Amino acid sequence: MFVIRSRAIDTSGWRGTRRLRAAAGVVLLLLSVNSAAAESPEDPRTSHRFQADPAQEVLGELQRVRVRHEDTLPDVARLFDLGYEEITRANPGVDPWLPGDGTELVLPTLFVLPEAPRDGLVLNMAGMRLYYFSKPGKDGVSDIYTHPIGIGRVGWSTPLGTTRVTAKAKDPSWYVPESIRKEHAEEGDPLPAIVPPGPDNPLGQHVLRLALPSYLIHGTNKPWGVGMRVSHGCIRLYPEDIEALFSMVPKGTPVHIVDQPYLAGWQDGRLMFAAHVPLEEQGGDWLAALELLDHRMNDAPESSSTAAIDWGRVARITRDGMGIAFPVQVDAPDVRQWLAAAPLIRTEPVANYRPQDDAASGPAEPGPGEGAKR
């Protein structure tokens, strides 16, 4: 089990008390019903690597898991390659640090792809998630890798737009920008001008440098911050995820940075809709969600359901901001039925993380320096 630094987290900025109680009621009722059913857990489904053709808009499958007494939500999140906000928002009302032995959690491992070019890296800020699209084969099918990310906190937002990977570095030094040194000094935590490679380096052991000056995609020495707004604008990944990406992503890879809190796409003839909590400085546009769904209905694939959209359901999904992909047509299962139908799986790692390998080890020798915000 990896160690997570205890940290008070304020969620008041993204969800009011009434909204929290409503969403929590649905999840907790679902969990109590399923617990009584005494289901036998199945093998977990992959949550970080998929194969898809160009027409596919939704990846993965929603899952449920029953936690053990020693588990925390961040523990479970890392096993299934989810971020902190992803797992806590999908399970409102569950204590992140003491969920309780036998409590069932919803794993939001069903992903609606953002609207962006499917080449290279796509980063969705609102969803706090990265996608890497490999080059398609002759049949048009691509391997798609997806991982949670930590992003810039309010006032240190990551710029949107298209850039590219310009360099890669293993075991980097961190050349601390003057603005960050000043901030830390004012907080009584002075930083040196250069932080060498090692366990105290917030860049971790792998870095992808971008054409955006001072912005990086990198690992971290504080995995608990993945899936949260904690950086000065750089993109953080779990150490095991950036290590895997580092070996796959070449220099010159395009990087598309978008901010899309509302996502819609077709899966098995059903229109799916996911609503993330909009970034505080961007705000949410309810009309944008309506226009997106209307556009998707007009572009429905052949043999898809022609049933009308349940706009009341869309309003509730948008209000709750759980980040879970739900079907939204009137002939589809309702929210409670959809969650209850997710398979119950065993608590075991399915992505890059292995708890037994979590012991940190310092690099053998210094690598090339990287001056960045982190």
Image (spheres, rainbow, N blue to C red):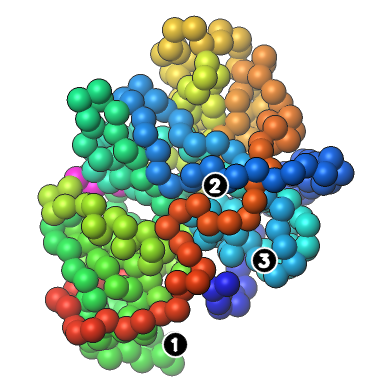
- Please give the name of the residue rendered at 17% of the width and 63% of the height, measured from the top-left corner: 168
**How far separated are the C-alphas under marks 3 and 1?**
33 Å
Q: Which residues are magenta?
A: 254-258
Q: Are marks 2 and 3 in contact (CB under 8 Å)?
A: no
Is 47 or 178 nearer to us in this picture?
A: 47
Which amino acid type is shown beneath numbered disc 3? Answer: Asp
For the N terminus, give its image quadrant: bottom right
* Coordinates of residue 296 in the picture (x, y in percent): 45, 19
Q: Could one spot residue 311 in this view of the protein?
A: yes
- Disc 2 crowd rating (10 Å Cα; few below 14, some 14-19, many 20+) is many
Q: Main secondary structure of the magenta part?
A: strand
Direction from residue 370 to residue 327 in the image, left or right: right
Which residue is the extreme one toward the right?
Answer: 36
Question: Badge 3 is on which residue?
Answer: 71
Q: Which mark is residue 301?
A: none
Percent from the top left, x then y, of residue 212?
19, 58
Which residue position is annotated with label 1?
187
User: Which badge, 2 or 3, is on the more N-terminal residue?
Assistant: 3
Which tag is nearer the camera, tag 2 or tag 3?
Answer: 3
How far apart are labels 1 and 2 at the CA level?
30 Å
Between discs 1 and 2, the one toward the N terminus: 1
Q: Which residue is mark 2?
A: 277
